[in-house]
Amino acid sequence: MTLCPHASLLDIRNFEQGTPREEIARLRQSHRMVWQEDEYANGGHWLVLQAADIDTVLKTPADFTNNFSPLLEDFPEEFLPEAQKSLTFMDPPQHRSYRALADFAFKPRVLAERVPLMQAIAEGILDGLGDSGECEFVDAVAARFPVDVLFRLLGVDEQDYQRVVDITNTMLLANDPDYAKDRIEGFMASLALFEFGAELAQSHRDRPRDSMTAQMLETEIDGIRMSNEQYGSFFNNLVAGGVETTRNTLAWLVYELCQHPEQWALLKQQPELVPNAVEEILRLRNTVVYLRRTATRDMEFAGEQIRKGDKLVCVLGSPNRDPELFDNPDSFDVSRPVAATRRHYRTFGAGPHFCIGVHQARMNLEVMTAAIVNRWSDITLLAQPAYFRSNFMDGFKRLQIAYSA
């Protein structure tokens, strides 16, 4: 067994200023995998650091199941059976059958039809900032945009927006006392989000309206339609993936543009590079730190002896900054080629659970970034950002900026 001589990478104290990228690089240079003890799970876990090994773990659910959560912490036994009804916890073939019921909502043609709505929402948010020339970017723009887009598409009533956002923050940021008192509250929030989704489905049956929710409920594949409970699990996945990740990525992009005025100038001169800038921030500042899987049997893998029940934690940012895959991997460069960047990073995972809303996420980021580049002539930090406390999600609570319209 390979033992790390340092404290566990995923110790929450290592994340007070964001993901500890230098330590990840050090570990990747020396290990394919490394065993680390931790306070968050029984016995410890394996860190998986190389792109090929991450792909194997995420693409081979027969050996590395998702049934026990993508989080390092174990779901309490009393919550696990209900959580396992979620798409997030399913393995094929069950996962494939339920995912197919929602795949249509993210087809390129369907997404293209949404662009005018998304552009209007982005413009409205920037209009609403007024003439002060400064804002707290996270709440005013980065968080509000994906909420307004996704909830409008899903048919969530506007008076419920903040309630759903609060539940989602508690679920994903349960290690931060500003959002939850403990991880148990986070697990309970996950179930609350399932329940809200199920209630949303029933409200669409009681009060039919045109929305992505209605379309998913009406979709039938091999004689199967979604129940309210199944839609609740989809809702949980869509909100967790569509709101938090977009919020954090937009905030990171603005932060990096403030830190690199030459990249901002290049983007202003060549706005056609907006898609490149989006892919670059997804690579450089992947907001989901890791994905966990659980070994289904004893085996040898990556030169190590794996036991049934061992936790394998895929560190998504490791290949994203691997010099074998990217030139100058720690540099922020909005001119990196889109296709090559997408091919080599692991920001959206891999395998059966590759992000279902990846195209929607990219479009969200591109639409808002294009609006900002078009409307603002400069952008600067007014204070250092406040990080939230999490070893699963990487982002800011607050980002105070100034800009010129």
Image: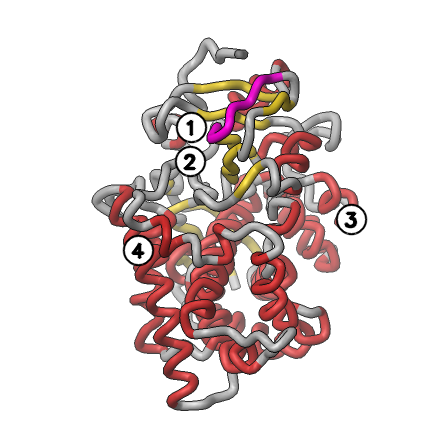
The tag earlier along the polypeptide, 1 or 2, is 1
Q: Is mark 3 in CB contact (under 8 Å) with mark 2? A: no
Q: Which residue is mark 2?
A: 72
The tag earlier along the polypeptide, 3 or 4, is 4
Q: CA distance from mark 3 to mark 4?
A: 37 Å
Q: Is residue 38 above or below residue 400?
A: above
Question: What amino acid is at disc 2?
Answer: Leu
Location of residue 256 by image quarter? top right
What segment carries the magenta color? 304-310
- Element type where label 2 sits in the image: loop
Q: CA distance from mark 2 to mark 4?
A: 17 Å
Is residue 152 found left or right of 114 in the rendered image? left
Nearer to the camera, 6 or 249: 6
Question: What amino acid is at disc 1?
Answer: Leu
Spot occupied by residue 284 in the image (x, y as percentages of width and height): 60, 39
The numbered dot on residue 339 is 3
The numbered dot on residue 189 is 4
